[in-house]
Image (spheres, helix red, strand yellow):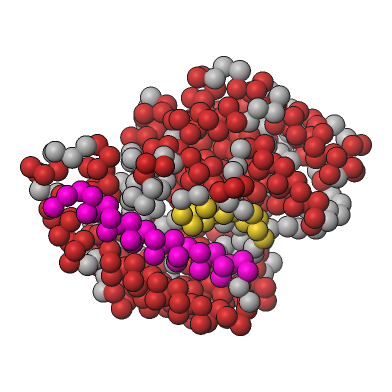
Amino acid sequence: MEIKEFYDYYAEIAKYSSAYALVEWDMRTKMPPKAAMDRAEVAGKLARTIFEMMTSPKMAAFVEYFNRPRVNEKLNEVDRRNVYLMTKEYRRASSIPPEKFEKFTIACSKGESVWQEAKAESNFNKFRPYLEEIVGYLKEFVEYYGYEKNKYDALLEGYEPSMTSEDIKKIIEGLKSELVPFIKEISHGKKPDDSILKGKFDKASQEKLSHEVLEAMGYDFQSGRIDETVHPFTTGIGNGDVRITTNYHLDDMTSALFSTMHEGGHALYEQGISEEYKWMPIHTGASMGIHESQSRTWENLVGRSYEFWKFFFPKLSEIFPQFKKITAEDFYKAINITKPSLIRIEADEVTYNLHIMVRFEIEESLINDRIKVADLPDVWNQKMREYLNVDVPDDAHGVLQDVHWSGGQFGYFPSYMLGNLYASQFFFSAKKEIPDLESQISNGNLKVLREWQREKIHKFGAMYDPKDLIVKVSGEPLNHKYFMNYIKEKFSKIYGIH
């Protein structure tokens, strides 16, 4: 048996996955509403085909053969990593009966369509039976996957390799102990004026702004596109096709701008993976946390930096002339106001992680049967009051705001918090290795950062586990102090705290 046989077989699976990704993208962007239920059946059929190929006797034979010690030790580093990743995926997938997986996929496809309607109507009860079905399948999958201490770990593993609920709780404990007192401290500082951000911003001009910022970041439009959707996302359709979406608000141009930069960061990662990994298991990100680190770098560490706006503010003022009346510094301060908010994707850098803590606690309790789906609106509202001191007015601004649960993505949310922490640590390393990085950004040379990311992170794909990659890049394990040092330095200046 040759390794080429394994790669040829996996390439067939990857091509079906590409077709599935295209169907999913269409469902969330261009598909006419009446096609939703039938298209869900198509998505389910593709997903089942992929699933059956992943768990077939042929794949079982590859996994068994290439994991034999004498065979495995003769493989090169890339081949060994591909076998390792495929083995993990095979063992997780093969534990689930194919018919269960197909039904779960159909439930998610239908669930996402109904979630959009429920969110528009702010009616959780409309979505509730679909979510109950999705959660029911996930609880079954947890038992198939197996776990040691916490049921939630079985789902977390799908997004964050080697990370446990206990690890997340420790990170939250350390982060919260510094973050909450700092939030109280800056509440007594001088709040910037954000009234300058209010106005009317037509969609065509916002689309132009999104294109300009992606161009500046180095996004390859020959290998992707940008479209509009309810909840922004990035999809890798295949090699040479990485698509992003954003959402335009006519009374707030910053929402689309920063979601575009966020999704653009994801896309740069996918576009930067080495072409030699095409159609291989390794042709993906190291984890969702590492993926989020790249998007949060561009959205926040670059997009909300003063250096970026020294360069980009004139472009913004050309597109929206009302900003010619103010300075880049005033705009910079306005986009960095910190205050408790209802919507996660619009939360500022300081309070964002509190939103993730709320979602992690809810998910972990739900999967471990401490709460039920029916309890979610009340539990959500209570935790938002506890963590952020905000009152949730309705389901659309509360429990229905995120798309993840409708797609069965339980275990994903911690990746956002981890992404913030990884991003700060990576960026600290980038500044050490590129001493004039900030002045380069001020001069509009954003591609110097993209090239650093490509060389240190992107090109490797999933070659390394997150815990190994962070050490390889920064020289030490994940440490929340980098995030807190960044936050304290930046916001102390903005709020005049010394």
Q: Does the magenta stretch include residue 40?
A: no
Which stretch is magenta?
A: 1-30
Q: Is 315 located above or below residue 347 in the figure?
A: above
Which residue is pictured at 36% across the width and 29% down the height? 471
Q: Is 319 located above or below residue 302 in the figure?
A: below
The quadrant of the picture occupied by the C terminus is top right
Residue sitting nearer the eye, 366 or 96: 96
Give the x, y percent position of residue 328.
Answer: 80, 32
Give the x, y percent position of residue 138.
Answer: 36, 69
| Secondary structure mostly seen in the magenta stretch | helix
Residue sitting nearer the eye, 90 or 8: 8
Which residue is pictured at 22% across the width and 54% down the height? 5
Residue sitting nearer the eye, 69 or 15: 15
Which residue is pictured at 13% across the width and 52% down the height? 1
Does the image show residue 366?
yes
Residue sitting nearer the eye, 172 or 210: 210
Q: Is residue 419 left or right of residue 346?
A: left
Does the image show residue 168?
no
Q: Is residue 99 left or right of residue 110?
A: left
Q: Does the magenta stretch include residue 25?
A: yes
Q: Is 105 located above or below residue 165 in the figure?
A: below
